Image: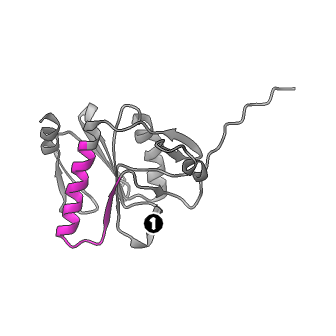
Amino acid sequence: MAPALAQEKSYTIDDIYSLPEGNRAELIDGNLYYMAPPTRKHQRIAGELFAIIREYINSNNGSCEVDIAPFAVFLNADNKNYVEPDISVICDPNKLSDKGCLGAPDWIIEVVSPGSRRIDYFAKLFQYSTAGVREYWIVDPDKNRITVYDFESEDTIDYTFSDSVTSNIFNDLSVNFSDIAKLLNS
């Protein structure tokens, strides 16, 4: 008789809410991924992107909402997926509740940290594309790269921190990453 294989524990959203105070984690397909505190560089990039997008939405009387982590996104109608993207843009107000976003945001931006690289580029990429996210940006300061996935047109384009990147959701919103690079070096 063959030995029984060890069964991996499958986690749920209840496990996320049961974490000790100060611990943060994301849940992808029942797998728990603990999150390290973000670096100053990470926070500066996320904060600048949030401010640019919020200003754009406000100055255009837009109906979309932009949120910055920690902000709960319940991607699917199950209890096995819970993420906290660095930036979430939600244009359907019916997806918003006091708990966060119930369903896929329209646009997600993740700023890569050394500990999140594999998750951002692989696990989240797959989850976001299958859950219905329209646009996903991976901002990777260590690689000097911004990868834009337009899931509606199935296009993927790489940029650098010397480029301006235009959103596909708001085609008149362009982010000048050379300005963000200057901010990081100041």
Q: Nearer the viewer, residue 66 or 39?
A: 39
Residue 171, can we see it?
no
- Which residue corresponds to mark 1? 98
Left/right of residue 172 with respect to residue 1 in the rendered view: left
Q: Nearer the viewer, residue 129 or 20?
A: 20
Colour style of the rendered protein structure: one colour
Q: Where is residue 65 drawn, in percent x and y?
A: 32, 65
Establish if 24 lies above or below 168: above
Residue 66 included in the magenta stretch of the image: yes
Q: Residue at x 28, y 43 (%)?
A: 43
Q: Magenta residues, as a range? A: 44-68
Q: Which residue lies most toward the right here?
A: 1
Task: Name which quarter of the figure residue 95 lies in.
Answer: bottom left
Q: Residues within 10 Å of mark 1 (few under 14, many from 20)?
A: few
Residue type, mark 1 in image: Asp
Residue 137 included in the magenta stretch of the image: no
Q: Residue at x 25, y 49 (%)?
A: 47
Establish if 138 lies above or below 104: above
